[in-house]
């Protein structure tokens, strides 16, 4: 089987997954398992891989998503316990006094928290800071969680340009320069992007307000009578599990868990494992009550964990290839590959289609296509697989490598956290209880426009050539 055929089959697999999810034919976890498995079988029958190699690829995929799955299970348990204990009720009451009925203030606050939270460049840690803190406010004000995610991912995309963030570091390594040096050329675009994401937050607030969001808005009036019975049950649960006297302990424990996460000296899931253990021991002493608390939140944790495990199959079959020593690995600069991955072959197909008619405008073209391509490529494959190919094509037309890298970094970053190929995206939608298709539908158009505006600004100030 030729590499061209393998690449085409890869695109067919991705398209099949996207169509299936958007038509709500099955759960994401099932789509992530079934279609890559069919692709793997075809590749085995075509002689590209052996059965044993497919098994090795799937094991490689679990290395990518396994830690995020563990992180999700324990983070859901931790924040669920903190919610039941009443910690967020106190925080929400204080936030509501500050924000009042200002819907726009809530969306702007979301963007600011996301910008600050993403200073460390970690997508998972940012979602764990932003979503649990703001989602209860959105629910209370009858605002859509998809808006929360959209505002957050645009802010995170802008901050993802920092030199210690993954995309900038990967692009710099391909260019053979320091990440800080690359970031120096991106600072004006980043400043423009921060202003743009705050403007978008205001716009998103106006949209929600028009829908009738707010404490006294149209949606609140409509929900008042419908939610009466649910409110009685909520009050009953709240009284049973609330621990108002332990608020100081719970808030200190939460700050300590997030501080450990940002400190990044332990696996990301370990702070939440400690947090769950401490929260259960202090808040809910009888062992029967501890079991009850875990069972209360096991459903959402298991559902999202299954999605991440399914994504491991997707990542393994599509993203991993085999290095010179025969081990499953992701292609990186300086690593000789014995057998290229499916996404590497997909990148080669794109390189064959793009150059002939586009030549000198390659940075702009790849910038425009970066957001749709983000749905097909994970971060490593995009920068280690596609960027070197684009640089080689650009060189044949006299286009320098730097503007190509800038276009790919800036525009792809905007779409990082709407891509199902990025494990942190699955964590974010799980915390917000939003389907991946709804997240993509609500965010894709805005993210694409946002990335093009950033690219046009780069053209305006002379960083990208026309």
Image (spheres, grey):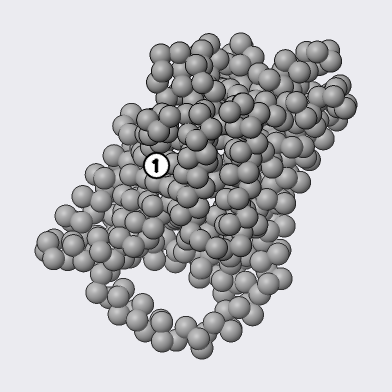
Residue for badge 1 = 68
* Of residues 9 and 292, the one drawn nearer to the viewer in this rendering: 9
Q: Position of residue 202 (x, y in %)?
A: 69, 56
Residue at image position (71%, 51%) is 446
* Of residues 210 and 105, the one drawn nearer to the viewer in this rendering: 210
- In the rendered view, does 455 fall on the left or right side of 250? right
Work out whether residue 295 can be spotted: yes
The answer to whether 457 is drawn above or below residue 90 in the figure is: above
- In the rendered view, does 462 fall on the left or right side of 227? right
Residue at image position (48%, 34%) is 44
* Of residues 117 and 2, the one drawn nearer to the viewer in this rendering: 2
Q: Position of residue 314 (x, y in %)?
A: 48, 41
Work out whether residue 252 can be spotted: no
Residue at image position (50%, 70%) is 140
Residue at image position (46%, 54%) is 30
The answer to whether 192 is drawn above or below residue 432 in the figure is: above
Can you tell which quarter of the image residue 125 is in? top left
The answer to whether 201 is drawn above or below residue 256 in the figure is: below
């Amino acid at each position: 089987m030729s590499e061209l055929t393998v690449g085409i089959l890869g695109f067919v697999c991705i398209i099949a997954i996207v169509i299936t999810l958007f038509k709500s034919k099955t759960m994401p976890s099932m789509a992530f398992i079934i279609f890559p498995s069919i692709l793997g079988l075809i590749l085995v029958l075509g002689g590209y891989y052996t059965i044993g190699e497919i098994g090795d690829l799937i094991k490689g995929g679990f290395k990518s998503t396994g830690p995020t799955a563990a992180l999700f299970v324990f983070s859901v348990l931790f924040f669920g316990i903190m919610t039941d204990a009443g910690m967020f009720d106190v925080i929400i009451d204080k936030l509501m006094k500050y924000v009042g009925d200002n819907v726009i203030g809530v969306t702007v606050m979301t963007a600011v928290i996301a910008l600050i939270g993403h200073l460390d460049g970690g997508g998972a840690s940012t979602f764990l800071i932003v979503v649990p803190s703001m989602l209860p406010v959105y629910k209370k004000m009858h605002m859509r969680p998809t808006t929360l995610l959209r505002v957050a991912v645009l802010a995170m995309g802008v901050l993802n340009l920092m030199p210690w963030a993954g995309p900038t570091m990967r692009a710099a390594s391909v260019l053979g320069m320091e990440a800080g040096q690359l970031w120096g050329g991106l600072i004006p675009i980043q400043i423009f992007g921060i202003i743009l994401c705050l403007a978008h937050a205001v716009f998103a607030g106006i949209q929600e307000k028009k829908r009738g969001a707010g404490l006294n808005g149209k949606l609140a009036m409509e929900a008042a009578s419908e939610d009466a019975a649910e409110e009685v049950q909520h009050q009953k649960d709240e009284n049973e599990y609330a621990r108002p006297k332990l608020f100081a302990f719970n808030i200190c424990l939460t700050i300590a868990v997030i501080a450990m996460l940002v400190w990044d000296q332990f696996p990301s899931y370990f702070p939440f494992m400690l947090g769950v253990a401490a929260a259960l021991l202090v808040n809910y002493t009888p062992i029967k009550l501890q079991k009850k608390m875990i069972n209360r939140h096991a459903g959402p944790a298991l559902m999202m964990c299954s999605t991440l495990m399914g994504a491991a199959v997707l990542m393994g079959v599509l993203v991993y290839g085999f290095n010179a020593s025969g081990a499953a690995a992701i292609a990186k600069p300086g690593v000789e590959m014995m057998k290229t991955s499916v996404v590497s072959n997909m990148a080669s197909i794109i390189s064959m289609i793009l150059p002939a008619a586009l030549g000198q405008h390659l940075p702009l073209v790849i910038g425009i296509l970066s957001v749709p391509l983000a749905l097909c490529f994970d971060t490593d494959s995009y920068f280690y697989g596609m960027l070197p190919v684009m640089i080689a094509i650009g060189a044949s037309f006299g286009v320098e490598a730097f503007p190509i890298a800038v276009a790919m970094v800036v525009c792809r970053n905007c779409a990082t956290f709407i891509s199902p190929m990025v494990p942190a995206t699955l964590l974010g939608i799980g915390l917000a209880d939003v389907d991946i298709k709804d997240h993509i539908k609500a965010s894709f158009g805005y993210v694409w426009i946002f990335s093009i505006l950033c690219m046009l600004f780069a053209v305006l100030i002379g960083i990208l050539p026309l």
